[in-house]
Amino acid sequence: MQRQPLVIANWKMNGDRNLVTNMAKALRESAAEFAAVQVVVCPPAVLLGHWQEAAFYDQIYLGAQDVNEHSSGAHTGEHSCTLLAEAGASFVLLGHSERRQFYGDSEARIGAKVRQVVAQEGMTAVLCVGESAAQRQQQETFAVVSAQLAAALSELTECEQLVVAYEPIWAIGTGETASPEQAQEVHAFIRQWLTEKFGPAGSLVRILYGGSVKAENAEALFAQADIDGGLIGGASLEAEQFVSICTAAQARSN
């Protein structure tokens, strides 16, 4: 079975209602150029409702940038899977390096969040993994990535609601991108890990590359055998750039 290409926009703490309107319009007008690609937009939580209004009839999926590991309770400022689902989200980013580094997301907490998401009907967990520059220089990439995968997925027995995003920390927001060959090497390793963990179903899990992906390098990255699309940061804030990246992913379906 062929894996459907997937491109996810992570706006982080950027964007506004005007960007929602303009991006929804740009994606709608160019939809034929990436008809076989699943496209997800993850705006800040306060814009989830506005995206639903702007793109309700479009085949563009809505995602959230994080979720709390509890289903409800006294967790001021947090959002549960149920609340995100009610807002229209069907994808959730988990374990992003910025969450790990700045907001206390430990391996145990990320694993708990993954379990919350996959327990929610119709919701997909997008698990982010990746190494630092120092870890790559010390040739620890595979050890770091496998440890992150094991910690987050150890209690899962199925992977139908799972996407993995490889985001080398040294390439996030730096303008530096892993070469297609470097990215493919890690993606192939992740594919093997997933297949060993989940059996044949693991070969169907989509693996995305994230790390300064732009219109200029997307086609070469997406041409790699195990790179099923991208998790896009800064370039997803520019409609023309993001449409070009989505269009580049279309070639994987041919």
Image (cartoon, rainbow, N blue to C red):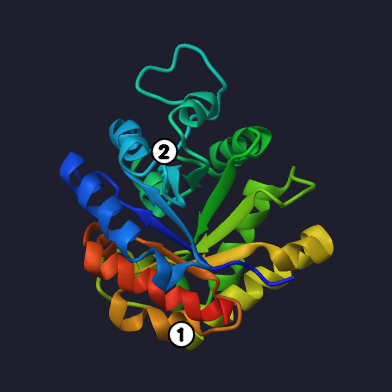
Q: Are marks 2 and 1 in contact (CB under 8 Å)?
A: no
Residue sticking out furthest to the top: 74
Which numbered circle lies on residue 180? 1
Q: Which residue is the site of mark 2?
A: 104
Q: Amino acid at mark 2?
A: Gly
Q: Secondary structure at mark 1?
A: helix
* Amino acid carrying mark 1 in the image: Pro
Residue 251 visible somewhere in the drawing: yes
Could you classify mark 2 by the number of other residues whose Cα lies within 10 Å: few (under 14), some (14-19), or many (20 or more)? few
Considering only order in the chain, which callout, 1 or 2, is on the residue closer to the N terminus?
2
Q: Quadrant of residue 52?
A: top left
Q: Residue at x 24, y 62 (%)?
A: 239
Front-most of 253 and 114? 253
The answer to whether 241 is drawn above or below residue 40 in the figure is below
Determine the residue positioned at 39% across, 64% down. Answer: 31
Residue drawn at the location 56% of the way across and 44% of the way down: 107
- Residue 140, percent from left and from top: 54, 72
